[in-house]
Each structure stands twice: as structure tokens, then as C-alpha cells.
Amino acid sequence: METIRAKTGALAAETPFTSEEKTVSDIFKSILEESRSIEPWLVATRRELHRIPEPGNEERETSAAIGAILDQLEISHVNIGTGVVGLLDGPQPGKCVALRADMDALPIEEPAGRPYTSLHHGYMHACGHDAHMTVALGVAKLLTSRRADVRGSVKFLFQPAEESTGGAKPMIEAGCLENPHVDYVLGLHVAPELASGKAAFRSGPFYGASDNLEIIVRGLSAHGAHPEQGIDAIYISAQIIQALQSVVSRSISPLDSAVITIGKIQGGTRNNIIASEVVLTGTIRTLSEDVRAFLRSRITELCARTAEALGGSCETRIQASYPVLSNHALQTTIVREIAERILGSDNVRDNEKPTLGVEDFAYFLRERPGTFWHLGCGKGGESAITPLHSSGFDIDESCLAYGVAVQTASALSLLKAGTYENLRFALSQRILFM
């Protein structure tokens, strides 16, 4: 169905949008029905992946399982490390949309008794990456049967090491967004605070940036009975920790967001010896690059001056980690509208506030326009919520079909629109493309 035409780079004004509304809605409804029809396959696939959790950059068994499924679907694929990149080409040339799914698991022991309990001792898919992979594979399955509707191509980026070293950046550096060139990128994360069948979106900054912080405080050891003969690195460290809290409360605007957390303190040798060295490690979280740069400078200066004022010295090391994940407005709005069409407007909401948690999908969004959204996976009310990264975490598996439907419709719509200008025009007319 053609709903827009390009004429010397401009869009034709005569397109009858209102008469197409019912047809478009029917197409979205059929995609949801198709997604539900493969629900047994989705559940079986998710459970297969759930049983074989692996740490970052060691997802060999997971990679092999994904490759086998892509082979069954006759989708070509290559490996980048332990990651997998699948490519589905449509019969007509066009744009390329990439769907990302992270693969790694967490070092958490899963409780026994589930029919799909982890077979790998000490590891568990406690962050829902098994669901993310399954949704991407479900989209691949649906698009295989709808290949004639694919105007362009769809890439499937199965990415390692989201929870640890950050697998997105190495995959990008290895060329996963080229050959063919990716125009848009989409990702999702399951959200236990939302019931299955619901979704949440946010345009602009959604996840925070993180920096790893190490502070080495040096003093002079002495007998604990004669503190005047030494310089107490533990006392200096305590003053530095206190001073760091004032950075957020007194050096950052109340309208900006920042967190400085010291998570580990290590120093001293015995109870009766003044410590000569203490190492503090922690994390810095921000939502803007300006605040991020300011904090790096301010923390370094404050630590050095505090230690110097108390007779010691200090070395501050700040290592950049994930950047801010900032969703692009146009793609976020389009995918949100598609979610409303598929799930119902009452089941789609906006996240009013970002989170200072991190997500390395941010690297993809720095390279290409796209969006990252939350797929409800909760089983019950708020009292029944079991958080991510806990041994009790699990999903309502009915969420898988909803995720497949929204991602499939979104990919097809972005491909059908073809250009950024067409997307903007489609949005202004509240029409999406199939």
C-alpha cells in the first residue's frame, strides 16, 4: 500500500490519508495476530536461551543457538566475536533498519524448580536478555514470512557484554552498522514494573552516562598510639567522602541530575597502625555531557585539595564508561504511535523521568537515529514485582508476542517511509506505513 509519493524531492499533497486509516490499523492488527500465533515457538525459544546463560564475551553456546535459528529461517549471518549479525534482504532496495538484542547473563545463581532453570551454575538471565534475543528472533521469523513487504533490509544485532565491558562499541568499530549501511536502529528492554501488554517511551535522555572513579589517598603510617607522628589516610578519605556529597548538592544545579557513589573502601593493615594508603572506588552518573565534564574536573580538584589540606596527597583516576542514552524524537514518536495502535493507547505511557542506570545501546544511538523503549513483562501488581538483577526475576512470557509485533511493525514502517522527510510527514498526518 502506497500512502506517500515523492515528487522532485517533495511529498505529494493529494495523498488521501484519512481513507487509509482503517487499512493501516487492520495491518497492525494482523501483525499482532501473527505474533500471537507463534507464541509457543517464542516461549520455547526463550526457555532454550534461558537455560544457557553466559557471561559477557563468552556467549559461545548462546551464539551457536542463535546462528542455528537464523539458519532455519534462511537468514544469512556472520559472527563478530561472540556476537551475531543477521541480515534479511527484501525484494526491493531501500533503507536498512537494525534491531539490537543483548546476549549476556549475570553472575547470579538461579533458584531451582523452574522448568527452564539455568544449566550453567552461577549464572542466570536475570536482566531479561533471553527475552530480548527471543523478540529479535521472533521479528526475524515474522519477516521471513513477510519478506515481500520488506522494502530494503533488516539487520539483527545480537550483542555480547552489555552487562560488563560494553559490547556495542566494539561491534560498531567492527562495522556492524555498514554493509549495508544502517539508517535506523531500534532496541527494547523488558520492564517488570509494567504488566505484560504495556509499554513505556521517553524522547531525549533516557539512561545516564557512567564514569568509573578511583581515588588513591596517601598519608604516612605510624603507631596507632601516636597519630601525631603520621598522616592518617583513612581520616583524609573520610573527609573526601563527605566533601564529594557537597559536589552534587552545592556545585550542580538542582535542575540537573548527578550521582557520586563510593562503593568500596580498601586500606590499612592492622587495628593499631595509622593507614598510609586508602583506595576508594565508585561511580559517577550524569545525564548531560556538560555536567559530566564539570564533575570530572571538580572531583579531581576537590580530592587533591582536601588531601593536601590534611597533609597527604591524592591521585584521582576517572575512566569513561557508557555515554548518555538519548532517544531521537521522531523515531521515538513513531514507534510509540505504533505501540498505541497495537497495544491500545491505554497501555502505552511516557516515562516522565529518565534513569541514572546505564545501557550501552547508547553507542548505537550516537551513530544512528532510533529509539530504545520499555516492554512490560510483569506478572502482577506492584506488590508482585521482582526487580531486574535479582535471583527471583522472571517474565510473563506473553510479553514476547507484544514485543515482536511492535518491533516488526516499527521496522516495516521505517522502511516503507524511506526518508527522514517522509517520516516527518507521516508523523504530522498521524499515518504510519506498511
Image (cartoon, helix red, strand yellow):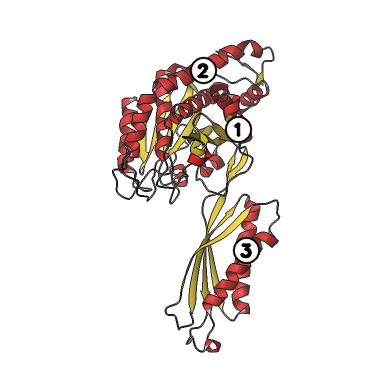
Marked residue nearer the N-terminal end (1 or 2): 2
The kind of residue on which mark 3 rests is Gln
The mark found on residue 245 in the picture is 3
Q: Could you tell whether 304 is left or right of 58 in the image? A: right
The mark found on residue 278 in the picture is none
What kind of element bears circle 2? helix
Tell how many labels. Answer: 3
Q: Between marks 1 and 2, how big is the CA–CA gap?
A: 20 Å
What kind of element bears circle 1? strand
Marked residue nearer the N-terminal end (3 or 1): 3
Q: Is residue 91 above or below residue 169?
A: above
Q: Position of residue 413 (x, y in %)?
A: 54, 23
The kind of residue on which mark 2 rests is Lys
Category of crowding for the residue at label 1, using alpha-carbon neighbours closer than 10 angstroms: few (below 14), some (14–19), many (at least 20): some
The kind of residue on which mark 1 rests is Arg
Q: Could you tell whether 23 is left or right of 392 in the image? A: right
Which part of the image, by quadrant, shows the N terminus? Answer: top right
Q: Which residue is mark 1?
A: 349
